[in-house]
Amino acid sequence: RPSTSPPPWEVGDMSSQTSETSQAPTDTEVIGVGCLIASSNGGEPERKKTSQKDPKSSSLTGDNREKKRRSKKRPQAAEELALSGNTLTSEKKEDLQRQLGFILRALAAAHEEVGYCQGMDYVVAHLLRVIQETVRWRVMNGTLTDAITSAPCLAELPENDVDDEAIAKFHVVEEAVFQVMNCFLTTYNLRHMYWPELRCLKTCCRVFERIIQMKLPVLADHFEHHELNVGLFALGWFQTLFLYLPSMPSATVCHMWDIWLVERSFKIFFRVGTAILFLSQPILLNHDLEGMMTYLNTFPDATLLNPDILIACALQIKVTNSMLVEIERSISAGEG
């Protein structure tokens, strides 16, 4: 892949930042900060564009079709680990692998400057697991958005022909996941995490190390004493948006991603990472380098990863966009 320098952390006019004096733990102000803050529209969150249809023209015709739609229940999200395949059959696993490969090849072709990078497969696999049933449900109920180019093709099929085979034939699920991941890479600038040489990812790890020093000084000293490089575990956390942790519940991942998408800021991941270390501090302080690395890569007691515990703790940790910019500047100045 061609070697290109990553975009700067800062984007936009810093003078337009909003005040950060609020002490509310759910700090959601949108201000300009770095390549991981989407600010293409001047700092305000973009609203998803949805086509406004005439209810009469978009509704399905026929009493039987209407009854069939009403009888369908929307699938409920399963309470399970984010990337666990324990509940899947061998046939389902093979189908997911085929879909995953199809989507990753499409993304690599669409983003030639990035191509494929380790970590993308984790994010795409989670999206595939989370939204595929919703996509199928919308197809069967005739409510699939026109943003999916195969939607009109399915609409032209007879009612009895719209089944799983037709959905697979037109790659509806794969296109939906591709569109979401493409939005992550472009609108939310996630592509910078997979940029050649991984400069942005490495910068995130160095920023995270400074945050640990600020928020958890005792643990930071313990890391330094045992010569534990934060990047040894943080690279995997940030590159996969915390899917790298095998015991991470799907509900926790979805919750932190929701905050990321609403705030349009990567700071939630710094807060979650700091919260994990804060909750694990009593255990980590009683281990040497090997013991700490084993714990941080496995989390044998996954209770602290429960969304009601982890996300609540993360939202109590104050990390602002201006703080991230200031830390990044100090790192850049030190390198200069």
Image (cartoon, rainbow, N blue to C red):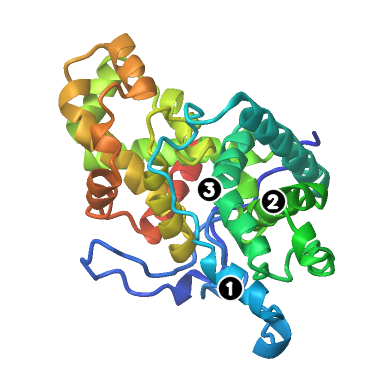
Marks 1/3: CA–CA distance: 27 Å
Q: Residues within 10 Å of mark 1 (few under 14, many from 20)?
A: few
Q: In this view, does 274 lie to the left or right of 104?
A: left
Outermost front residue: 64
| Picture disc at residue 67 | 1
Q: What element carries label 3?
A: helix
Q: Quadrant of the N terminus?
A: top right
Of pointers 3 and 2, the one earlier in the residue sequence: 3
Kindly identify the amino acid type of the residue bearing the numbered disc 2: Val
* 104 or 193: nearer the viewer: 104
**For residue 166, side relative to residue 216 (left or right):** right
Residue 130 percent location from the top left of the image: 53, 48
What label does residue 130 carry, if any?
Answer: 3
Q: Which of 149 and 108 is in front in this view?
A: 149
> What residue appears at the point 31 percent right and 19 percent down from the top-left corner?
295
Q: What residue does disc 2 label?
A: 173
Q: Is residue 143 above or below residue 320?
A: below
Question: The residue under label 1 is which amino acid type?
Answer: Lys
Q: Can residue 49 be seen?
A: no
Is residue 203 rendered to the left or right of residue 218? right
Q: Residues within 10 Å of mark 2 (few under 14, many from 20)?
A: many
Mark 1 or mark 2, earlier in chain: 1
Relative image position of residue 157 (x, y in whole percent): 83, 65
Q: Which amino acid does label 3 sit on?
A: Val
Q: How crowded is mark 3: few (under 14 residues within 10 Å), some or many (20 or more)?
A: some
Q: In this view, does 59 lie above or below 131?
A: below
Q: State the separation of the CA atoms marked 1 and 2.
A: 25 Å
